[in-house]
Image: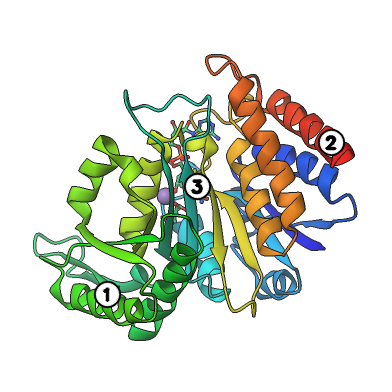
Amino acid sequence: MRLAVIPGDGIGPEVVTEALKVLGEVVPAAEVTRYDLGASRWHATGELLPESVLGELREHDAILLGAVGDPTVPSGILERGLLLRLRFELDHHVNLRPARLYPGVRSSLAEPGEIDMVVVREGTEGLYAGNGGLVRKDTPNEIATEVSVNTAFGVDRVVRDAFRRASERPRRHLTLVHKTNVLTHAGSLWSRVVEEVSLQHPEVTVAYQHVDATTIHMVTDPARFDVIVTDNLFGDILTDLAAAVTGGIGLAASGNLDVTGRNPSMFEPVHGSAPDIAGQGLADPTATVLSVALLLDHLGKHEAAKRIEASVAFDLATRDHSAPGATHAIGDRLAALVSSNTRTA
Ligand code: NAD
Ligand code: IPM
Ligand code: MN
């Protein structure tokens, strides 16, 4: 297994170190190549993602990323020039973000119920497409536009993926989240595609919810959700909220998938570089460890993925959540659990 690793900025390198510790226990033969990309490289050389590096990344089976973004770099430079560029160049059209409330984890909600959902967020279009601009900049008449791009091709492939996932889950339920009452052009495309694909999946029940109402239900009755399919920006916002109700952003994993397998998929925690806690050993590496489990699952190493997930589940069930331990201590604990699971498996 050839794995490219981009530790990135802030807590990125801290959580990636722990995730690699855990990976080493299940796939000791993994060939890991680190790529130094992010704020320090940009400061030193002005480079974000050189073509040669992009070419090398393409040669790997998968990519593990920590986080990008730094207060010393103008907002958007690293996010667009590195992270989104990777997602776009590698055609990561399915952004997979499971949110599950593990036993023993305290939700921010008083009565959360059994939360086990997966958000299938479109990853290459929408308001992220970078389609827009500024006219009459720095005048009182300045106009800024950001145009959401929704192609039939792009919507169709992510909706199909979401239906496939829903049909393999016990509840077989899919919710389209949009804002069809206002965004009528994109809304009608998304609704039509969901309706069309649903004809090929009679086993999946389908619901629709406006995104604003979804935020209500996400905190009043999150257990109602199974698979959510939604556009790029709605999915970004909803998955931070889904993380918050399932024990916090330190536990939320994600995969940026090219489901065709033509390009390596990229796995990363949902959270960012957390400059407010960087360098203090306060970051929870669990989200990155669970992202490694998603990575292994994607590469067909289901048993290895299950071992990691089971170890995380055990740790979460037995952890003192008021004092989970330092970043490296959590990593050591998870690596030890995975190692003993590996020996008994
Ligand atoms: P953030 O996710 O970095 O932090 C939000 C809050 O969550 C902070 O209080 C932080 O301390 C906490 N937090 C995050 N990860 C944690 C962890 N593993 N353990 C414990 N607490 C954790 O979001 P932000 O503050 O909005 O953004 C900071 C920077 O990260 C920005 O530059 C932003 O663009 C970037 N960002 C990058 C990614 C990514 O690389 N995928 C994702 C989100 C934000
Ligand atoms: C995420 C992040 C990114 C996004 C940013 C940093 C570009 O918030 O991965 O959720 O908006 O997708
Ligand atoms: Mn986000």
Determine which residue is flagged by label 2: 339
Which of the two labelled residues, at mark 2 and mark 3, occupies the earlier sequence position? 3
* Beta carbon at label 2 within 8 Å of ligand 1: no
Residue at coordinates 61% horizontally, 20% vertically from top-left? Answer: 319
Mark 3 Cα-neighbour bin, 10 Å: few <14, some 14–19, many ≥20: many
In the structure shown, which secondary structural element does the residue marked by tag 2 occupy?
A: helix
In the displayed structure, does residue 338 sit left or right of residue 14? right
Amino acid type assigned to the residue bearing label 3 in the image:
Val
Q: Nearer the viewer, residue 169 or 229?
A: 169
* Image quadrant occupied by the C terminus: top right
Q: Position of residue 254 (x, y in %)?
A: 54, 53
Inter-mark Cα distance, 1 to 3: 24 Å
Inter-mark Cα distance, 1 to 2: 45 Å
Q: Is residue 247 above or below residue 118?
A: above
* Beta carbon at label 3 within 8 Å of ligand 2: yes
Quadrant of the rendered image containing residue 342: top right
Quadrant of the rendered image containing residue 259: bottom right
Mark 2 Cα-neighbour bin, 10 Å: few <14, some 14–19, many ≥20: many
Q: Position of residue 120 (x, y in %)?
A: 43, 61
Determine which residue is flagged by label 1: 190
Inter-mark Cα distance, 2 to 3: 26 Å
Determine which residue is flagged by label 3: 270
- The reply to whether discs 1 and 3 touch (Cβ–Cβ < 8 Å) is no
Q: Position of residue 32 (x, y in %)?
A: 82, 56
In the displayed structure, does residue 130 sit left or right of residue 255? left
